[in-house]
Image (tube, grey):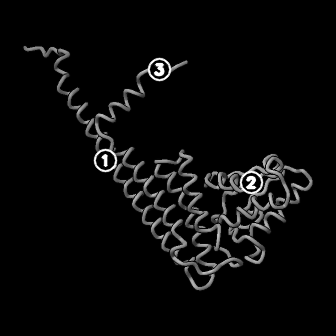
C-alpha cells in the first residue's frame, strides 16, 4: 500500500478544482497521485492532516472526480483509504462525493 | 490530672468542615470551568460570525482573489479543533455534517478562479444558515452540559447508577 501525506508529498495549501485554478488543485492531485495507483490496482492511503485546510471544490474534484473518470464506488472504497485526525468532518464529506 | 479521652463524636465538627470545604471547592472549580467554556464558546461564535462576513464579502466581490479564498479555507479548518477543545459535541455526527455543510456552502461552488462570478447576497443564504445551525447547536449543548437544574442532575445520576432495564 502506498501512503500519501498531502501536506508533505503534495502541498500544505491544496486549493482549486482544476489545474487552471493553480498547481495544487484537486484535478492535479487526482491525476498525479490517485489515478496512477488505481490504474494498477494498488491501494493508496491518503493522510489529510497537516495541510492548511481543504476547500470542498478540491475534495470534490479529487475524490468525486474519480467517479466521473469511470471508477466505481466499490473500486474506490477498496483502493482508497482516507485518514484525518485533525478534522473528521472531511471523511464524511469525501464519502459523500464518492457515493454520489 | 484530667486525661483527655477521644470520643468519635468529637470528630464530627472536623468531618463537617472537611465535607463543606470539599463541596465549596468542587462548586468553585465547576463555576470556573463553566466560565472558561463560555469564554471559549463566545470566541468561537465571534470567529464564525467573522467567517460569515468574510465569506459573503469574498463571494460578492467584483473579482476573484486568491488570498481571501485561502484565508477562508484556513479559517474553516480551525472550526473542528475548537469544537473538540470545548468538549461539547465532538462525538456528534450531526456536528461533523454541519461543519462539512459550512465548508461546502463557502468553498464548493464559485470559490475558484475558473468558475468565480460575483454573487448577489440573496444567493448566499446557505452560508448564514449553516453557520447559524452550528451556533444554535453549540449554545444548546453548552446549556445542556453546564446549566442543568438540580433535579435534572439527580435524574442523570440515577440513570447512570441504576441498573439498566430493557427488553431482551
Q: Is mark 1 in CB contact (under 8 Å) with mark 2?
A: no
Label 1: chain letter: B
Q: Position of residue B3 (x, y in %)?
A: 12, 14
For disc 2, the marked residue is A98
Density class for disc 2 (Cα within 10 Å; few <14, some 14-19, many ≥20) is many
The extreme right residue here reads: A40
Quadrant where the image shows the N terminus of chain B = top left
Comparing labels 1 and 3, the label whose residue is closer to the camera:
3
| Callout 3 secondary element | loop
Density class for disc 1 (Cα within 10 Å; few <14, some 14-19, many ≥20) is few
Q: Position of residue B108 (x, y in %)?
A: 65, 67
A55 w.r.t. A82: above or below? below
Labels 1 and 3 within one chain: yes
| Callout 1 secondary element | helix
Residue at 23% x, 34% y: name it.
B20
Q: What is the CA distance from the residue labelled 1 to the residue labelled 3?
A: 34 Å
Q: Position of residue B29 (x, y in %)?
A: 33, 44
Label 2: chain letter: A
B85 left or right of B143? right
A43 left or right of A82? right
Res. B42 image quadrant: bottom left
**Pointer 1 or 3: first along the chain:** 1
Label 3: chain letter: B
- Give whichever of A28, B12 is nearer the camera: A28
- Give whichever of B146, B111 is nearer the camera: B111
The numbered disc on residue B31 is 1
For disc 3, the marked residue is B165
- Give whichever of B95, B66 is nearer the camera: B95
Amino acid at each position: 500500500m502506498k501512503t500519501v501525506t498531502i501536506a508533505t508529498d503534495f502541498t500544505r495549501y491544496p486549493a482549486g478544482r482544476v489545474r487552471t485554478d493553480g498547481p495544487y488543485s484537486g484535478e492535479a492531485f487526482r491525476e498525479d497521485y490517485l489515478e496512477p495507483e488505481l490504474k494498477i490496482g494498488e491501494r493508496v492511503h491518503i493522510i489529510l492532516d497537516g495541510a492548511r485546510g481543504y476547500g470542498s471544490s478540491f475534495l470534490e474534484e479529487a475524490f468525486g472526480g474519480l467517479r466521473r473518470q469511470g471508477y466505481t464506488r466499490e473500486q474506490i472504497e477498496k483502493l482508497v483509504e482516507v485518514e484525518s485526525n485533525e478534522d473528521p468532518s472531511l471523511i464524511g464529506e469525501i464519502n459523500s462525493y464518492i457515493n454520489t | 490530672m484530667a486525661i483527655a479521652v477521644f470520643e468519635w463524636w468529637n470528630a464530627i465538627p472536623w468531618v463537617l468542615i472537611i465535607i463543606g470545604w470539599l463541596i465549596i471547592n468542587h462548586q468553585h472549580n465547576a463555576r470556573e470551568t463553566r466560565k472558561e467554556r463560555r469564554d471559549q464558546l463566545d470566541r468561537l461564535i465571534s470567529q464564525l460570525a467573522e467567517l460569515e462576513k468574510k465569506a459573503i464579502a469574498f463571494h460578492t466581490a467584483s473579482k476573484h482573489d486568491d488570498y481571501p479564498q485561502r484565508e477562508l479555507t484556513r479559517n474553516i479548518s480551525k472550526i473542528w479543533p475548537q469544537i473538540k477543545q470545548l468538549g461539547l459535541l465532538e462525538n456528534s455526527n450531526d456536528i461533523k455534517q454541519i461543519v462539512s455543510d459550512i465548508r461546502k456552502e463557502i468553498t464548493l461552488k464559485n470559490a475558484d478562479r475558473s468558475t468565480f462570478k460575483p454573487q448577489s447576497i440573496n444567493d448566499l443564504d446557505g452560508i448564514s444558515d449553516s453557520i447559524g445551525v452550528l451556533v444554535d447547536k453549540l449554545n444548546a449543548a453548552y446549556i445542556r452540559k453546564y446549566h442543568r437544574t438540580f433535579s435534572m442532575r439527580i435524574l442523570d445520576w440515577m440513570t447512570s447508577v441504576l441498573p439498566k432495564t430493557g427488553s431482551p
